[in-house]
Structures are given as C-alpha cells and as structure tokens.
Image: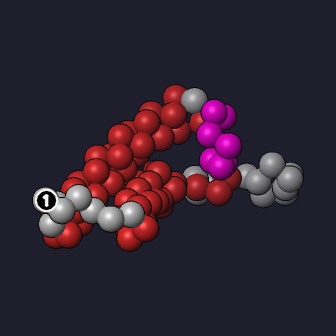
Amino acid sequence: MVYILARAWIGTFLACTAAAWLRGWLHDLPPSFAPADFVVASLLNAFGEAVLTGALVAALVAFRPKMLASYADWLYLPGSTSPGRADA
C-alpha cells in the first residue's frame, strides 16, 4: 500500500502538477484563460493521471511485480526476506 500511494499516486500527482505549473510560468496563458482556471485544470488533470497510474501500478504489483523496476517484496511486505540475507 505504501508503494502504491507513495511511488505511484503521490509521485505522479506532484510531477504532473509541477510540470503544468512550470509550463504556465514559462509560457503565457491565453488571454481568455484566467489563472485560477489554470490552477483548477492542472490539479484536475494531475488527479486523473495519478488515479490511472495508481490503478495500473496496483494491478502490476498484484499480478506482475517483476515488471516494476523499483518494487521489491522485501522492502514493502513485512516478513519478507532480503535477497542478500539468508538468516532473516
């Protein structure tokens, strides 16, 4: 659960929000587009991206954990042993 929330959902949400705000800061907004509308639109977009990424990562963790390069059972599941430790 920590892996899905921290790596997938929160990471995607923050990255999408930061990218949208950086784009808004570096490039001018259209004249008919209010800054408050831009903030709301970027947050809604980031939320949608985070939900989709979280769902995909949850499915991959459940069914194909080896496809995720940053996931390891021994880091996120209690009682799992580290690959380098035979005594645990």
In the picture, residue 27 is in which quadrant? Answer: bottom left
Relative to residue 24, is residue 37 drawn left or right?
A: left
Residue 24's quadrant in the figure?
Answer: bottom left
Nearer to us in this view, 5 or 86: 5
Assign the magenta stretch its main secondary structure: loop
Above or below: residue 37 compared with residue 51: below
Q: Is residue 43 visible?
A: no
Q: Amino acid at mark 1?
A: Ser
Question: Which residue is the site of mark 1?
Answer: 32
Q: Quadrant of the C terminus?
A: bottom right
Magenta stretch: residue 68 in it? yes
Judging from the image, the colouring scheme is secondary structure
* Residue 3 visible, this orientation: yes
Residue plotted at (35% across, 40% down): 52
Query: Mark 1: which secondary structure?
Result: loop
Report the number of discs.
1
Q: What is the x, y in percent for residue 46?
A: 33, 54
- Return the residue nearer the eye: 45 or 79: 45
* Left or right: residue 85 compared with residue 11: right
Which residue, as the protein is rendered here, is positioned at the far front? Answer: 31
Instruction: Please give the name of the residue rendered at 23% of the width and 58% of the height, measured from the top-left corner.
Output: 30
Vertical arrangement, residue 4 with respect to residue 18, above or below: above
Q: Residue at x 43, y 36 (%)?
A: 56
Q: Residues within 10 Å of mark 1 (few under 14, many from 20)?
A: few
